[in-house]
Amino acid sequence: MAYKSLQEAVEDLERVGRLIRIKEEVDPYLEMASIQLRAYKEGGPAILFENVKGSRFKVLANLYGTMDRCKYLFRETLPKVQNLMSLRGNPMEALKKPVSGVKSGMAALTALPLKLHAKTADYFEEVSLSDLPQIQHWPMDGGAFITLPQVFSENIDKPGVMNGNMGMYRIQLSGNDYLKDQEVGLHYQIHRGIGVHQQLAEKQHRPLKVSIFVGGPPAHSVAAVMPLPEGISELTFAGLLAGRRFRYFYEDGYVISRDADFVITGEVAQGQLKPEGPFGDHLGYYSLTHPFPLLKIHKVLAKKDAIWPFTVVGRPPQEDTSFGDLIHEITAGAISQEIPGVKAVNAVDQAGVHPLLLAIGSERYTPYQKETAPAELLTQANRILGTGQLSLAKYLWITDDPGGQLSVKDIPEFFKHMLERIDFERDLHFQTCTTIDTLDYSGTALNKGSKLILAATGPAIRRLAALIPETLANALQDQQLLQDYPVVLVMPGVLAIEMPAVKEPVRAAQDLAALKELLLNNKDALRGFPMIVLTESASFMGDSLANFLWVTFTRSNPAEDVHGLEETMVNKHWGCKTSIIIDARIKKHHAPALTMDSEVEVNVDKLLQPYKGYFPTTLF
């Protein structure tokens, strides 16, 4: 169905029982976020808040909360989009199937943005920033944020919407040092299109005009997060997925989305930065306060009966997981077209997406050689780490799959396959002093850290153990250092060992050295355990696969925190003979993990009692 507005989507979802309305007054300070988190956890419906404390606007949550609802929203256009994306990456296929190719070409043509001759007064009223719902998601957040914005900017050297960029970059509405109703914080990560536009504008000493759209047809938000191939604009994709052209016009030099519920326009202040954050982010921790660009507000516009959509990010899975699943649905197979030989990549959601990639490639180099060392896999790994948002990855595990049975989505089986084959003296490849995700605080500074490629191919070289030998357990528990060493089996071949928290680096290094000596004295018992992870709570890590992935890969910086038993160094290539040890304990420079406010949770329990059928397990 081609929704003309967010209101149409709300009415349609309500008609088919996929949306509920909450009429009681809800506080945008923490309460709305708590309800959103519960709704997602329960696989519940979309929620329309009709009575928002401090604002006259209605608020929509959990719109994209399930993959089933996403497919429903785009039920008529999703197949067409998938077809066009596949042809975009494989033009020869279009020549082989000319009828299909023509249909896709016409679909793209009818999705081109439509410029209108209009003015804002025809569709919008002017309001202030403080009129908008001031939603604060987590207790330590620096203020209210926009979490589903469509941020549009143009290339100052190539003006026009087809050369513009529309991305989803968080916006801080209030708090910190921002002048009330005059300024907002603009946070974007490295490798983003708006950063290129800002740099071009600053070189010419010209202002960068930015338009922030909130709401509108659901397809517009999806377009803002899509990793699109070169040559396809976000506005064209928005029209294609919406089944209706993106309508826009210019006023005062700003692009105005005709169908958005809200529009905020302003200029990026040249040479000015202000503290932005903290903000509870998708790795499950706060991103802390840092200087980021400042947007000087020109106008704030709202439609009559406008609806403000929002989401909450936190330790995955959350609603943005649905975005990732939808993107995978749309772009399935695109990675193999972009990087020859790569069959599949999984940015692991439970590990915070960017910290961990699992990939299946091909090993076709020098097939006459008997040695089964990774070769082409390393070429493909470097291509992966140089591709778009995949470049933010911190750990990349890559293997080939001659039998065609392995899946990057089957994480336990993938780890089993890798750990049975990897040679730690040869197959670990570090990249040090490089860029990592802005939101990842495991590195040495903001955006700075290291990467590790783990590549494996060939037949299995070890059998993984599924039971902890008594000799090893007794040795760990008998060792009298700061405390005993509880040990937990996470999965076959992987142990979690509990150690004291890292409070003083010198003492922590001494503890680690003592543990390594103890393990070396029992290395025969470790033959089936090629991977050991250090943590403050071995029971928590062993409790679920999700806990293992989250703790291990969000709390470690490869170059600093990966150690080994019987370490080797040959021609500056580091390796080890027995087991790798990943120190995933929390360090002083790490950001705090996200936790809810207990008093707010009690209030939300009471507020949701009339709706307990939708929240059966999240009420105390």
Image: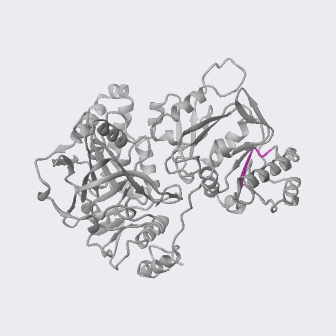
The image position of residue 518, as x and y in percent, is 85, 50
Residue 483 visible at all? yes
The image position of residue 421, as x and y in percent, is 71, 36
Q: Quadrant of the C terminus?
A: bottom right
Identified at 81% across, 61% down, the residue is: 482
> 36 or 268: which is nearer to us?
268
Identified at 14% across, 56% down, the residue is: 120
Q: Is residue 126 left or right of residue 292?
A: left
Q: Is residue 376 left or right of residue 204?
A: right
Q: How many marks?
A: 0
Q: Residue at the far top: name it.
A: 368
Q: Which residues are magenta?
A: 528-534
> 112 or 579: which is nearer to us?
579
Q: Is residue 347 magenta?
A: no
Relative to 407, residue 309 above or below: below
Q: Residue at the far front: name it.
A: 271
The image position of residue 314, as x and y in percent, is 50, 60
> 326 or 497: which is nearer to us?
497
Q: Quadrant of the N terminus?
A: bottom left
> 548 or 109: which is nearer to us?
548
The image position of residue 556, as x and y in percent, is 63, 49
Q: Quadrant of residue 274?
A: bottom left
Residue 396 visible at all? no
Relative to 350, residue 386 above or below: above
Q: Is residue 495 left or right of residue 7?
A: right
Identified at 42% across, 49% down, the residue is: 326
Relative to 588, residue 346 above or below: above
